[in-house]
Structures are given as C-alpha cells and as structure tokens.
Image: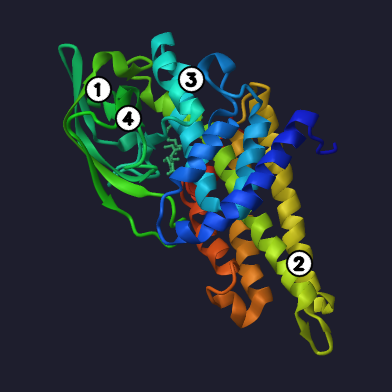
Amino acid sequence: MKLTFTKEQEMMRKMVRSFADNEIAPFVEKMEEGIFPHPLLKKMGELGVMGIPVPAQYGGSEMDFISYVIAINEISRVSPTLGVILSVHTSVGTSPILYFGTEEQKQKYVTKLASGEYLGAFCLTEPSSGSDAASLKSRAVREGDFYKINGSKVFITNGGEADVYIVFALTSPEAGSKGITAFIVEKDTPGLIIGKDEHKMGLHGSRTVQLTFDNMMVPAENLLGKEGEGFKIAMANLDAGRIGIAAQALGIAEGAYGHAVRYAKERVQFGKPIAAQQGIGFKLAEMATDIEASKLLVYQAADLRSRGLPCGKEASMAKLMASKTAVHVSTEAIQVFGGYGYTKEYPVERYFRDAKVTEIYEGTSEIQRIVISKHLYK
Ligand code: CAA
C-alpha cells in the first residue's frame, strides 16, 4: 500500500502549508503570550478551512475528511494551538449538529460554524467525570418550552470564545449513559457563566475554561437528537475528534523534527555537523520512523472516516501512536539542540509543552487502549 493523495488533497496541503508558513508563523509569539488568534480564524473562514468536510448546502467546503486532516496536520506543524482550535471547532463543535441536528438546526448553526462566523465548543467533561464520561452530573429538566440546566464543566477548549456550545446533561439520571442528552447552547444564553481560565503548560493561545450552568434556560428546539441519545452523540463524534487530535500530534512531531534536522546539519562539534555523528543520526532516524508510522495510522483512520466506514479502533490507534510520537520526538528534538533547546530562544521547548496534552485530551492514552481492546474482543 502506498500513501497517495488526490490532486484536491494536495492542493489543500499546499494552500494550508503556505498559509501556515506565511501567516500563522508570524503570529505564534502573540499566541504564546496568550492572545487568542481571532484574525487567523477570520482568514481561515475566508479560505474555507473552518468547514472543510461540511457540505456546500450548509456553507462548507464540501471536501473529504482526509483534506480536513491534512489541514490540521499542516497547521499544527507550525501552531499546535491553532490545530486544536480547528479540530475542536470542526469535529466536536460542528459535526454533532451536522450529523444529529434537524434541518432547522443545520441551517441556523452549521452554516455559520462552517463559514467561520461562529466558533464551536464541546462540553462533556466535568470536575468529577473525565475518563468516565458517562458519570457526568449536569442536570437538564424540561420546563414548558425550555430545558433548565444546572451543573458545571471543566477544560472546555474554545470556551469563552465560542458562539455555540454542545452541552451534555442528564435528563434521566436513573438511566445512566442512556439518560444523557445533548443540547445546542448559544453563548448569550441566560445562566451560562464562563468561569476561570486554566493556565496551561502549553497551547497558550487556545482558551480552556470552566463553565457553570446556573438555571440555564435552553429552548426545547435546541435539543440535539433525542433525549437519551447524548452519550452516543458524544462518542460517535469523538471517533472523528480523535483523528483530528492525532493529526495535531503528527503535526507537532513533524514541526519539532524539522527544526531538529535543520539544527543538526548546522551545528558543528568535534569538527563535523552533529547530524553526521552516529548518536544524533540514530536519534533522527528513530524520530523519522515514528513519524512515518504515525502518519500511516492517521491517514488510514482518516481514509476510513472519509469513506463513511467504522473507524473507532483505528482512530484510537492513530491517537495513541501519534501522541506518543509527538511527546517522544519533541523531547528528542530538545536533546538534539542541547542546552539551547531548553531555552525559549528556540521553538523546540514549545513543541514539547504543546505535545503532552495530546496524550490526555479527547481520551487519555489509557482510554484509547480501553477502546482498542474493546474492539479486539468484539
Ligand atoms: N460510537 C457510538 N456509540 C458508542 C461509542 C462510539 N464510538 N462508544 C460507545 N458507544 C455506546 C455503546 O454502544 C453503548 O451503548 P449500548 O449500550 O446501546 O450498546 C454506550 O455508548 C455505552 O458504552 P460503554 O459501555 O462502552 O461506555 P463506558 O461508560 O464504558 O465508556 C469510554 C466508554 C470509551 C471509556 C468513554 O467513557 C470515553 O471515551 N471516555 C473518555 C472521555 C473523553 O474522551 N473525553 C473527551 C472530552 S472532549 C475533549 O477533550 C475536547 C478537547 O478539549 C480537546
């Protein structure tokens, strides 16, 4: 099997790579200072990048899922921060409405999300339910034409910046995971309180906040899917979400590796470039091999998803492998740079800080192993 891309997919890569090198790269330092990249997201909307796999009838670019993964991969090579903003916006912020929403909901929300006018967020995790997502406690009670929602969420990527939040809450607490329901919540909904910003190790330009729902009144027409379908909606969209995060991790590894190779060719010690010393050559060879293996898994999962085939196992394998590779390669990149790599003068420490969370969010590596093993025993 050879990994080949279509002409359209290659065009997407070229376009996004050029955008990343020419427009994202000069903004990276600002994002490191904690500035949210609104100007870049606006341009990405104009380029059609905020709705790549969304049908044209809902304002999207109507390209395949592989093209979307290429975009995250290329963006994350330069800015993992922007990679996660795009991945969350598309895979778990927009797709739940595209796949489970009514025609009215798609017209009202997906069109604006796909054009980049709106930014999306996904609210599953709670203070006491992370890996055990089905144990969430937020409660939604029907009151006339509204649902009254009370509870809290943590680690919400794009929170505070998003226009639309996909919120999961219990409508039937006694039914366990089958009592969870999904809602589309607009940012100005009364009772939606944006809480504390998390001060993270990396991804400084992306916002991660706590949310509180204090008697939040959500119109009944914003019920997403049916009552009790929420957990399946969350899990089904996380399958694709995990491919997006795997692509982000792949981009991180490629970015760090690129800097390491360039430096190794320039840096001279013991009378020759360190790239020509076996210790560094072996390191770079292993980094390149891990990246190649991750790439095959990421694009295999993306190909399955593009063709509408089940991809849960492959998505988890891709995320498990690519996140491990991102952490390993960014660590080794620092080693190649030596003392300089440990300073903020060079970009490799940023990749290292950005890499770690890919082993945590959208399901930890331990959860990916659970998902994979469940598939093996099916
Ligand atoms: N697609 C559709 N349905 C699915 C599914 C999938 N991928 N996975 C499970 N389900 C269904 C099951 O079929 C089952 O339904 P039935 O009883 O009708 O068969 C139901 O959901 C319950 O399934 P499980 O018994 O397997 O559920 P569980 O409670 O054991 O949990 C889990 C499974 C995989 C561990 C899940 O809890 C999980 O994925 N945990 C990790 C949570 C997570 O990834 N959080 C990410 C937060 S978002 C984020 O991080 C975004 C960001 O900021 C970057």
Dividing the image into four equal quarters, which quarter contains ligand 1? Answer: top left
Task: Tell me residue 89's x, y (percent).
Answer: 47, 35
Compare marks 2 and 1 and give the one earlier in the sequence.
1
- State the SS at label 2: helix
Compare marks 3 and 1 and give the one earlier in the sequence.
3
What residue is disc 2 on?
Answer: 284
- State the SS at label 4: strand
Q: Nearer the viewer, residue 57 or 258?
A: 57
Q: Amino acid at mark 3?
A: Leu
The quarter in which the C terminus is drawn is top right
- State the SS at label 3: helix
Discs 3/1, front: 3
What residue is disc 4 on?
Answer: 168
User: How many residues crowd around disc 3 within 10 Å: few (fewer than 14), some, or many (20 or more)?
Assistant: some
* The image quarter in which residue 123 lies: top left
Residue 146 can be seen in this image:
yes
Discs 2/3, front: 3
For the residues labelled 3 and 1, the Cα–Cα distance comes to 22 Å
What residue is disc 1 on?
Answer: 171
User: How many residues crowd around disc 4 within 10 Å: few (fewer than 14), some, or many (20 or more)?
Assistant: many
Discs 1/4, front: 4
Compare marks 4 and 2 and give the one earlier in the sequence.
4
Task: Identify which residue is drawn at 55% across, 52% down.
Answer: 80
Q: Tell me the colour scheme of the image.
A: rainbow
Q: Amino acid at mark 2?
A: Leu
Q: Is residue 18 above or below residue 255?
A: above
* The image quarter in which residue 277 lies: bottom right
Dot 1 and dot 4 residues touching (CB under 8 Å): no
What residue is disc 3 on?
Answer: 98
Q: Nearer the viewer, residue 33 or 139?
A: 33
